[in-house]
Image: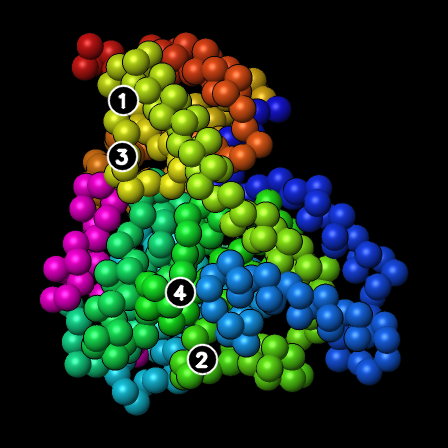
C-alpha cells in the first residue's frame, strides 16, 4: 500500500501505541479516585498535559483534552461566542476553514451572531489589510487556521495575533494540520485559543486538545463532572491522553529535520507532476506551505475517478477533502482561491508524511501520467479543447 493521505489521518507510531497499552489494559483506574490505581491514571494525564504544554510553549494549566479537533474547534467558537455575547456578536474567520469551523459558524449565525468570512488571495493566504478593515467595535473573536488541510497554505498567524491583541479581541487558531509540521509558540504569536488533534500527528483517533490562555472568558460545552479543572466534563480518555502526549513529543522533536525531509519529497513530487503532465495547476502558495502538501488540478478530468484508479494500484490519496468526498460540490477551498468549478473538480491532494519514502514518490510519478491521460482521452471537455 502507498499511503499518501496523511492530512486525512496518520498511522499511529509504535512508540505511541506501546505507551498507551498499559492504560487500555491493567492500568484502567478512573483518574478521579483516591486509591493508587486511580492516582496512576491521574499521573499519566498530568504527564501528557505537560508534554503538550511544552510543545506549545504554554503552562500545563492551559491545556484541555477533548475528543477531537472538531470538538476543540466547536468549544473555542461556541464557548467564546456565548460567554462574550454581551460584549459583541461579531466573529471573523476565513472562507477556507475546515468544516468544523465553518459549520459551527453557520450554527452561530442562527443564534444571532454575525460572521465575516475573509476571502483569501489566489495563493490561499488572507490579506492582512482586509482583516484590519473588517474588525469592528463588536468583534469578539478572530478564528483563522494556521495551515490549510487541502492546499497547505500557511497564514501569518503572528501578525494576526498581534492585531487581535492590540484590539483586545480573542484569537483562536485551528492548528490541526500545523502542530508537528511547524514550530508554534502561543505566546510569540499571541494566540488565545488553539486546537489540534491526535490522529493527524501519528497519535490515536478520538483525542484532541484545546489550549485556552489563562483568563480567557469561555463557556463550557460539556456539563457534568469536574474533570479538566471543571471546564470539560466526562471521564478522561487516559490512554489517548498518554498517546497524544507522546505523539506531540515525537512530532515536535527534530521538527526542522523532518520538515526538510518532507519538503524534499514534496518538491520532487510537484516537479515530477509538472514535468510529466501538461495542463496542470499547482494550488496554494509554493513557499508558505505545509512541508508534505501537494495539491494540483489536472484540467479536463474528475478527481473522483482519478482516486478510484489510484486505489486499484494501492495508492491512497484524496481529492478535495475527506469530508467532501462523496459530495458533488467541488471543494470550498479551491473555489475560494478562484478556481472555476470544472477545474476544481480535477483536484488531487497528495499529503506526504514521515513514513513515506522517495521510492514511493517515484512510484506515484511513474503511474500518474498514464492514468491522467486515460481519463482525459475519455473526457469530452479534453477532446473539445484539443
Ligand atoms: C482533521 C481536521 C480537523 C478535525 O479534527 P478531528 O480530530 O478529525 O475531528 C479540524 N481542522 C482541520 C484543519 C483538520 O485538518
> Which residue in the protein does label 1 denote?
280
- Dots 4 and 1: beta carbons under 8 Å? no
Q: Are marks 2 and 1 in contact (CB under 8 Å)?
A: no
x, y percent for residue 63? 53, 70
Magenta residues span 112-133
Q: Are marks 4 and 3 in contact (CB under 8 Å)?
A: no
Compute the Cα span from label 2 to label 1: 47 Å
Give the Cα separation between the discs numbered 4 and 1: 37 Å
Q: Residue at x 31, y 48 (%)?
A: 154
Image x and y of residue 131, in percent: 18, 63
Residue behind mark 4:
186
| Upstream in sequence: badge 4 or badge 3 | 4
What's the CA distance linking mark 3 and mark 2?
36 Å
Q: Is 75 positioned to the left or the right of 68 in the image? A: left
Is 381 placed above or below 211 here? Answer: above
Q: Residue at point 60% right, 82% down?
A: 229
Residue for badge 2: 214
Let me know if residue 85 appears in the view. yes
Q: Earlier in the sequence, mark 4 or mark 1?
A: 4
Decide which of tag 3 and tag 1 comes sooner along the chain: 1
Mark 3 or mark 2, which has the lower sequence index? Answer: 2
Q: Nearer the viewer, residue 134 or 323?
A: 134
Residue 146 falls in image quadrant: bottom left
Q: Quadrant of the C terminus?
A: top left
Cα separation, mark 3 vs mark 1, equals 14 Å
CB of mark 4 within 8 Å of CB of mark 2? no
Looking at the rendered image, the quarter that the N terminus falls into is top right
Q: Which quadrant of the figure has residue 189? A: bottom left
Residue 367 appears at what percent x and percent y? 46, 13
The residue lying furthest to the bottom in this view is: 86
Q: What label sits on residue 286 in the rendered view? A: 3
Amino acid at each position: 500500500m502507498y499511503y499518501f493521505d496523511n492530512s486525512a489521518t496518520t498511522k499511529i507510531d509504535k512508540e505511541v501505541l506501546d505507551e498507551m497499552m498499559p492504560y487500555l489494559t491493567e492500568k484502567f483506574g478512573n483518574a478521579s479516585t483516591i486509591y493508587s490505581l486511580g492516582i496512576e491514571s491521574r499521573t499519566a494525564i498530568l504527564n501528557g498535559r505537560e508534554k503538550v504544554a511544552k510543545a506549545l510553549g504554554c503552562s500545563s494549566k492551559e491545556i484541555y483534552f477533548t475528543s477531537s479537533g472538531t470538538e476543540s474547534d466547536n468549544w473555542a467558537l461556541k464557548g467564546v461566542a456565548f460567554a462574550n455575547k454581551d460584549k459583541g456578536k461579531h466573529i471573523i474567520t476565513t472562507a477556507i476553514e475546515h468544516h468544523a469551523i465553518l459549520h459551527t459558524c453557520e450554527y452561530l449565525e442562527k443564534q444571532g451572531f454575525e460572521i465575516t468570512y475573509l476571502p483569501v488571495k489566489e495563493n490561499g493566504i488572507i490579506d492582512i489589510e482586509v482583516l484590519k478593515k473588517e474588525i469592528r467595535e463588536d468583534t469578539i473573536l478572530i478564528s483563522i487556521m494556521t495551515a490549510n488541510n487541502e492546499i497547505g497554505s500557511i497564514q501569518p498567524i503572528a501578525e494576526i495575533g498581534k492585531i487581535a491583541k492590540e484590539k483586545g479581541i480573542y484569537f483562536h487558531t485551528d492548528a490541526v494540520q500545523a502542530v508537528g509540521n511547524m514550530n508554534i509558540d502561543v505566546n510569540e504569536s499571541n494566540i488565545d485559543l488553539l486546537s489540534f488533534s491526535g490522529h493527524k500527528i501519528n497519535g490515536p483517533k478520538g483525542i484532541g486538545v484545546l489550549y485556552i490562555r489563562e483568563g480567557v472568558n469561555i463557556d463550557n460545552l460539556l456539563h457534568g463532572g469536574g474533570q479538566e479543572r471543571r471546564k470539560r466534563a466526562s471521564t478522561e480518555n487516559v490512554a489517548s491522553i498518554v498517546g497524544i502526549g507522546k505523539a506531540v513529543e515525537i512530532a515536535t522533536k527534530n521538527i526542522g529535520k523532518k520538515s526538510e525531509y518532507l519538503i524534499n519529497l514534496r518538491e520532487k513530487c510537484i516537479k515530477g507532476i509538472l514535468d510529466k503532465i501538461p495542463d496542470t495547476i499547482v494550488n496554494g502558495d509554493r513557499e508558505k506551505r505545509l512541508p508534505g502538501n501537494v495539491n494540483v488540478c489536472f484540467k479536463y478530468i474528475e478527481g473522483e475517478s482519478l482516486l478510484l484508479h489510484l486505489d486499484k494500484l494501492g495508492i491512497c490519496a484524496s481529492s478535495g477533502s475527506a469530508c467532501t468526498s462523496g459530495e458533488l460540490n467541488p471543494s470550498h477551498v479551491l473555489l475560494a482561491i478562484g478556481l472555476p468549478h470544472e477545474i476544481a473538480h480535477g483536484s488531487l491532494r497528495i499529503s506526504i508524511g514521515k513514513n513515506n519514502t522517495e521510492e514511493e514518490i517515484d512510484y506515484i510519478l511513474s503511474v500518474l501520467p498514464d492514468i491522467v491521460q486515460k481519463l482525459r482521452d475519455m473526457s469530452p471537455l479534453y477532446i473539445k479543447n484539443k
